[in-house]
Amino acid sequence: MLEQAQHEKSESYYKDLEKAYINTMQEIEKDIARWYQRFAENNEMTLEEAKQQLKSEELEEFRWTVEEYIKRGKENALNQKWMKQLENASSRVHISRLESLQLQLQQHVEELYREQIEGFQELMKEVYQNQYYHTAFEIQKAFEIGFTLQALDETKLTKIISKPWTADGQTFSQKIWRDRNLLLDTLHTELVQSMARGEAPDRMISSIAKKMNTSRSNAARLVMTESALFSASAQKDAFGELDVEKYEIIATLDSRTSSICQSMDGKVFKLADFMPGVTANPFHPRCRTTTAPYFEDDYSERIARDLDGKTYYVPSNMKYEEWYQTQVEKHGEKKIVNQKRKIENREKDKSEYESYKRILGVEGPNSLDAFQDIKYNDDSEWYHLKGFKMAVERGDINVLTGFNTYKDVAKNIHTNLVGLTTTDGIPITSYKSHFVDRIIGQIEAGTAQKGKRSGVRIEDVKEALMNPTQIKKSTNAQQYINDKCRVTINDTTGHLIQTAPRTKG
């Protein structure tokens, strides 16, 4: 399908852009580190010190850097306003340390956004042109007759993509420059505020990296939304050229489709009422919905995608709600809902997965997909994975214990302890994840190491619950004690809370 190919092309462009953002941040980090190394004592710099003027030899070196920027700017067609600023900076006899760093960082941002605009222009031209001709081809194929179609040349394409298509009246170039200005203002403010707070360079770099990530997310949203917008506009123009009077909204039949696109699927509008975001796609960022000419006697088919990813065909007049019911009947409501949650939460889950990977390494899920499968489809595995991660993060157990060992211990607790009734008649119904950590311990049960807590044997816990030498009561808790260990339970719920080896003496 062309729509899928267009979507993948936009995704590919964004991945390249994402690499450019990462490279830019790396260059910014290097410049900040070098600047601190040169001007700061013990990596500390006050705002007053940052505003000191460059010395003569420092100013001379700064001019060499600016001259290099000017040369690169001429070679790569940087915007003329910035080139003028560089030329002015090169001729100044007084410039502060802070201004020199601000200029270096802005140079990286200017180069990033020049690359972004050039790539974006080419992508939008390609998206519009491909959709325009493809739409015309499909209509002509359906009628089995040729039509005279207005050709698209480079001049016409440039004019088309330079028009504002959205309600805010801004072109995509203006939106990119708006984001650039916002990023520059934010970076400059962050520099000054970090120095005013007396923060170390790593704190400053971390703050700037967060701002860059926000800008990168904005760029991703702009790429996917604008490419969908130009694709829809190309369809509209082709419809107009070929005298199509009505069109139909065609949502993607899969579990990723948004609620608004589900509700719009199958609706028919007059071409004169075509309005992106209202009566035509895109209806939201990253929208995959498209349109098609509407014919009342259409007996064709449309493509659908099953929950397992396999594609198949259904009657073209099948609406999203009807298709959804076929999926519920086949897979069950819970599986469908969980699949939608995986898609809706993917960005948030990606961040969470990175945290798990950082803490657990090879003991955690080996991919984001594997992580989401556990989180949404396996309650028991997810409960234990969360417990294992928290235990490692707190230092209660060593990551080298291994997740499989952690699960085996949890299974043994369930098998040997859950279902017991204590000597005073309290049924053991469940256990907290922290209880697993206590059974494992920081070192093997029965061994000793200064500063490390030993684990506890499950048979010793069982013995304490069944034949304690002492029972201590407190609010909502009871402690069972023998010569080997102490075991605490919630006497209301029957949950095993924690255990610890008995210290001698």
Image (tube, grey):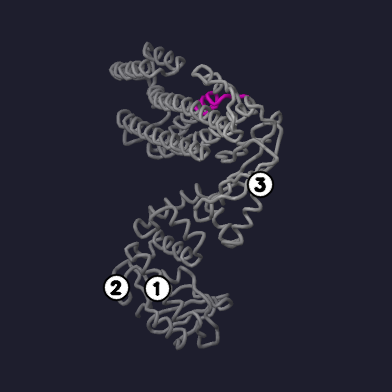
Neighbor class of circle 3 (other Cα within 10 Å; few <14, some 14-19, many 20+) is: some
Quadrant in the picture for residue 178: top right
Asked if the stretch drawn in magenta spans residue 480, the answer is no
Q: Earlier in the sequence, mark 3 or mark 2?
A: 3
Q: Which mark, residue 448?
A: 2
> Label 1 crowding class (10 Å Cα cut-off): few <14, some 14-19, many 20+?
some
* Residue with the mark numbered 3: 317
Find disc 1 in the rendering and name its residue. Answer: 409
Q: Amino acid at mark 2?
A: Ala
Residue 477, quarter of picture: bottom right
Q: Which residues are magenta?
A: 169-181
SS assignment for the magenta stretch, majority: helix
The three-letter code of the residue at mark 1 reads Val
Question: With 27 as the anchor, is 281 left or right in this view?
Answer: right
Of the two numbered discs 1 and 2 in the rendering, the one whose residue sits closer to the viewer: 1
Up-down relation of residue 201 to residue 242 (above or below) = below
